[in-house]
Image: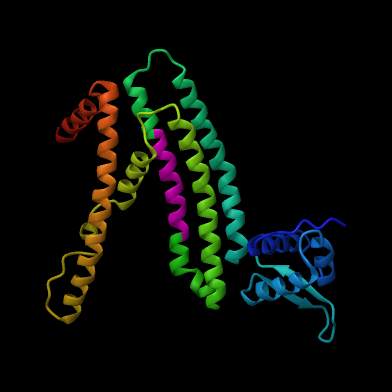
Amino acid sequence: MKFDKLETEEDRRTKIIEYISSHQGCNIEDIVRGTEKYVSRVTVYKVLGLLEKVGAIRRHKDKPNSRDHKFFVDTNNPLVSLPKEFDKFKNYYYPLLERLKKDIKEYLTYQERYAGEITQCFRDLALVGLIFAEFIRIYDTRALLVWPKQIQDTGSLKDLYMLLFSKVLEIRGEISKVFQFLFSDLGILTEEGILGNVGVNLLGQNILQSPLIYNIHEHNDFETATNIVIKHIMAIWEKDRKSYTLKVENLETKMDEQTGGFISRARKRKRKILEF
């Protein structure tokens, strides 16, 4: 039998989880036979031990003295649920990227391009980035508040964080492909400026405007220490926001050059509406 070796631990773990998910209650020999094309017997035993350790799978005996163990997958375990959730997201998100490529490719074929359509391209690209960033926010929260309680083993928790970042980088790579496709023709827009706009939106307002974080009066040592931490965070926040804002401004300057000042005029109109 030809052996199609899986290169990474993540791939081997995923293959075994997929088999058990499709054959809930299978025994270890079933798993060995079902994955023998991809994973060796020794690796199957090793991975099963690791998955059981973190609660991704559980084994059950029909009788106390039985040697035949049945395996089941815990679908709520993040090592099981995260890959499935990302795959489902990709099923929705990748067609959106393709739709964007198609729309802008059609726009590029027009002989006369309206300046407002250029800004629409900018907004669509920024929206694609923001959608992905908001999706990742969900997992940032889980990684901080939920997963450490679900998985007690530090090494396994690190593996889960690595799994998350590998999934994020995979989708980020697909987004980069879209940018490369677009900017090979659409020279007035740059990936740096688009992502800078995403960064400005994600950073949001000054954290001191939050109802939970405010400029604390130093009545005691705790409040003094709190202000030190807030000032440290603010310094990082201001540095990043300034960097993202500069990238957006550089992009808008380039767009103004291409559209005869359309972006500046649109910004002034928006400011007047807000003042009114």
Q: Residue at x 25, y 64 (%)?
A: 233
**Residue 211 at least partly seen:** no
Q: Is residue 45 above or below residue 36?
A: below
Name the residue nearer the viewer: 140 or 102.
102
Name the residue nearer the viewer: 54 or 23.
54
Q: Is residue 123 above or below residue 167?
A: above
Number of residue marks? 0
Magenta stretch: includes residue 261: no
Most extreme residue toward the right is 1
Q: Please give left or right for residue 259 compared with residue 274 in the image.
A: right
Q: Residue at x 25, y 32 (%)?
A: 253
**Residue 47 at least partly seen:** yes
Q: Please give left or right for residue 31 compared with residue 218 in the image.
A: right
Most extreme residue toward the top is 111
Question: Where does the image place residue 42, in percent across and percent down from the top left?
Answer: 77, 73
Most extreme residue toward the bottom is 65
Task: Tell me which secondary structure the magenta stretch mostly adopts.
Answer: helix
Q: Residue at x 52, y 70 (%)?
A: 158
Name the residue nearer the viewer: 179 or 115.
179
The stretch in magenta equals 124-139
Question: Where does the image place residue 264, in percent across and percent down from the top left?
Answer: 21, 28
Picture quadrant where residue 220 is located: bottom left
Q: Residue at x 49, y 73 (%)?
A: 148
Which quadrant is home to the N terminus? bottom right
Picture quadrant where residue 79 is located: bottom right
Picture quadrant where residue 15 is located: bottom right
Q: Is residue 60 above or below residue 230?
A: below
Q: Is residue 223 above or below residue 114?
A: below
Question: Where does the image place residue 139, in percent across and percent down from the top left?
Answer: 47, 59
Which quadrant is home to the C terminus? top left
Q: Please give left or right for residue 177 compared with residue 5 in the image.
A: left
Q: Please give left or right for residue 141 compared with residue 8 in the image.
A: left
